[in-house]
Image (tube, helix red, strand yellow):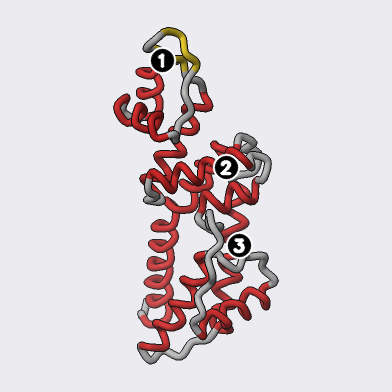
Amino acid sequence: MRISELSRRSGVSVTTIKYYLREGLLPAGRQTAATQAEYDEQHLRRLRLIRALTGVRGLSVSTTRDLLDVLDQHTGDTHLTLGLALGAIRLAEEPAGQAPEAAEVDALVKELGWDVHESAPARAALAETLASLRSLGVPRDWRTLLPYARLAERTAVLDLDQLDGIEDPLELAEHALLLTVLLEPALLALRRMAQENESARRHTDH
């Protein structure tokens, strides 16, 4: 397809596509003339993933390029593909936070028997949440998170079930990213609605 068709099908402007080509995010098309090139379905999938990474996850162009380079080098590693797309795995190893709560997160992961990398951003986020709760006078430790973690396990099964059968690594990364990140507001909304319903069940006369 010509670049105009690629633009129409992807929803990305021709100007932006040319920018992605210059920056190395999108590989060059097959040259058909001095100023013309042909593009294929892989270009379309990659463009959609670039949009998801920059728009949904909010990554910079340079970080997106680095992430795509890693995906290109490990196209057969599904776990790595999902981890990078979802932000569960960092591009570069960084030391984990040394806050006291970090040890509690380690204890939680061990109790659950989860396989979660030590540098996973979610570990630091969980430690920070525990620290914030305590600073506000809400005593919580990792054990109080166990029931929530079990619910999260069930959600993860539902998430990954929907990705079964997708073999193309770019398409897999795009679907994983959109499914997880865009669904998070809906999950939060469902929790709020369930809380309201439970409150009504407990405290309202019918």
* Label 3 Cα crowd, 10 Å radius (few <14 / some 14-19 / many 20+): few
**Is label 3 or label 2 in front?**
2
* Label 2 Cα crowd, 10 Å radius (few <14 / some 14-19 / many 20+): many
Task: Name the mark on residue 71.
Answer: 2
User: Which quadrant: the C terminus?
Assistant: bottom left
Is there CB contact under 8 Å for labels 1 and 2? no
Q: Is residue 202 above or below residue 61?
A: below
Instruction: Give x and y (percent) for residue 183.
Output: 44, 53
Task: Name the mark on residue 154.
Answer: 3
Disc 2 secondary structure class? helix
89 to the left or right of 201? right
Instruction: Give x and y (percent) for residue 171.
Output: 54, 37
The amino acid beneath tag 1 is Arg
- The front one of 197 and 100 is 100
Marks 1 and 2, how far apart at CA = 25 Å
* Label 1 Cα crowd, 10 Å radius (few <14 / some 14-19 / many 20+): few
The amino acid beneath tag 2 is Leu
Mark 3 or mark 2, earlier in chain: 2
Residue named by callout 1: 2
